Image (tube, rainbow, N blue to C red):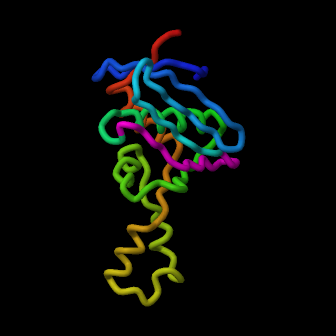
Amino acid sequence: MHYPCRWRNNQTNKTFTVTKTGMATIRIEAQQQGGGDHGHAEYATNGADFLFDHVESHPEVGSGLGSLLFYLACHEAALAGCTNVKVSAGAWTAEEFYFKMGCHRDPAVMANPVLTAGLNAAQLAQLAHSAPIIGDVAHCHTTSGTVTFQRWELLVT
């Protein structure tokens, strides 16, 4: 992917210019041409780990912008050789978004006897719900790409 690039949402017919900046923390930004819709995703890579910080889009829900930004970040992570997704600061309200993108809760938390010893059913459920959100870069790239390309088209510039 070469930046800047332009993407069109085929459902809304809005076109966005997407840019990428940063070295340690990378930021992918999208700005609607001639309009107010915008968003960004921030992430870093550390060896095999793709450390996805967060995604923000305005409008927040239903525009497909978050899916596009997550897909582009996964694409960049795959190019960098990352294999593991670790969502570091995803809002609890965005949990379903990350699941839709191919991520899941880390099952290792529930398999750790030190963490689960002596917990009742309600506490175990709370622990399971608070486990880190993780994923496989290749799977998340494919899943988010499937969601993204239902709505978005990369424009040749």
The residue at 47%/57% (across/down) is 133
Q: Is residue 114 left or right of residue 150?
A: right
Which image quarter holds the N terminus?
top right
Please name the residue shown 52% across and 56% down the image: 89
Q: Residue 135, percent across and down?
A: 49, 51
Measured from the top left, where is residue 153 in percent x and y? 40, 19
Image coordinates for residue 146, horizontal then vertical, percent: 37, 32
Instruction: Find the magenta span and give its range.
Output: 45-59
Report the front residue among 35 and 4. 35
* Camera-side residue of 111 and 21: 21
Location of residue 22 in the rendering, given as x and y in whole percent from the top left corner? 68, 36
In this view of the protein, which residue sits in the foreground, 58 or 85? 58
Residue depicted at x 47% and y 54% = 90
Secondary structure mainly formed by the magenta segment: strand
> Is 51 one of the magenta-colored residues?
yes
Residue drawn at x 36%, y 20% is 14
Q: Is residue 144 above or below residue 153?
A: below
Residue 67 lies, with reference to residue 85, above or below; the image says: above
